[in-house]
Amino acid sequence: MINEQQVREILGKLEDPFLHKTLEQTNGVLNVSIKEEKQHVSVKIAIAKTNTPEQMQLQMKVVEVLKEAGASTVGIRFEELTTEVLESFRGKATASEAHDILSPLSTVQVIAIASGKGGVGKSTVSVNLAVALARLGKKVGLIDADIYGFSVPDMMGIQEMPVVKEDRIYPVDRLGVKVISMGFFVENNAPIVWRGPMLGKVLDQFFRDVEWGDLDYLLLDLPPGTGDVALDIHQALPTSKEIIVTTPHPTAAFVAARAGAMALQTNHDILGVIENMSWFESKVTGEKEYVFGKGGGPKLADELRTELLGQVPLGQPDWTKEDFAPSVYDTEHSTGKIYLEIAKSVVNQLEK
């Protein structure tokens, strides 16, 4: 009958499907137990990412090699490598591994912008935060992941289309932000009537087949709510930070708490809350009118045990025909300055 040392040697030669390092190199063979009378081998293995097709392929290989070595039956349990172990390999990642968004070795900071309901200005926040980060000198990408309600290209005044070369999609660069959206691939603003699995494949393409290049931050403008698309994205990304957008209205904040709960349940960290449409300031009198009430943002931040990143007033950017971007605030605009402060807060959190 095969012994424990032989099991460890055999499994140690297999590769972690994400790190492309042997299980011996990652110390991924955590436990081995053998029942000689039944010729049964049980193993516990740690890999970079669990509950994936790659895990299933490795599982089949483990069973195959252990049975070839003499085991009659094989039991396997998988768990994920610790954050410390992943960080040690992330520091040694090749350029391609570091830029593969879905790789556990990726050095790109992914920030998902979420809301509990539509109409709270989540896409406006996504666009302006991305532009503000670019103004701070960061390399920024933006995925318009709101497949049914795509709006980012129009909001940013994008006229060009992505270029496809050798099966790679090159995003449109606008205002220092690399942008990809379903809006680029739909003619005449046609409605999307696909079902969930088809949408999942599109989003997978946005991660895998887009030539993002060297990025510091990748922002995702998520669909509102906690539906299939949002859940698929949460599960696909190895690590992600999240910002929750709400209005001051108590009901909006109550609904937004569900989006925050989803982030926590999928082990994603919440960076903070942005309260949009916080007030309307009269250009005549300078007085603030709290059109949607008060308190929703601070209350939500308190409930999610996170910070209030900023409060953004209700208003409209100034724009020119020469540089048309109907939803982007200029650097010198008072609201543009608010977004810049929010961006600085995000950078401080992620790079401290």
Image: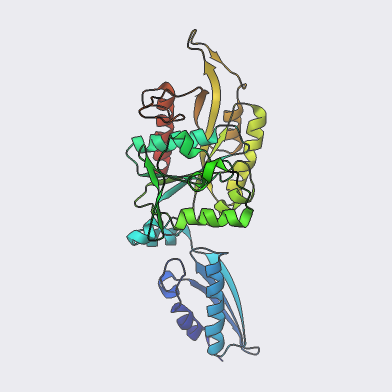
Q: How is the image coloured?
A: rainbow
**Quarter holding the N terminus?**
bottom right
- Expressed as whole percent of the image width and height from the top left, the position of residue 10 reads 47, 83
99 left or right of 57? left
- Expressed as whole percent of the image width and height from the top left, the position of residue 8 reads 48, 80
348 left or right of 56? left
**Quarter holding the C terminus?**
top left
- Expressed as whole percent of the image width and height from the top left, the position of residue 326 reads 45, 29
Q: Is residue 245 above or below residue 141?
A: above
Front-lying residue, 27 or 107: 107
- Expressed as whole percent of the image width and height from the top left, the position of residue 305 reads 57, 38
Front-lying residue, 141 or 266: 141
- Residue beneath the point at 40% across and 29% down: 324
- Residue beneath the point at 43% across and 27% down: 338
Q: Quadrant of residue 331?
A: top left
179 left or right of 200? left
Q: Is residue 352 visible?
A: no
Outermost residue, front side: 188
- Residue beneath the point at 48% across and 64% down: 48
Front-lying residue, 241 or 102: 102
Front-lying residue, 246 or 298: 246
Q: Is residue 324 above or below residue 141?
A: above
How many marks the image carries: the answer is 0
Q: Is residue 302 visible?
A: yes
Q: Quadrant of residue 2?
A: bottom right
- Residue beneath the point at 56% across and 90% down: 70
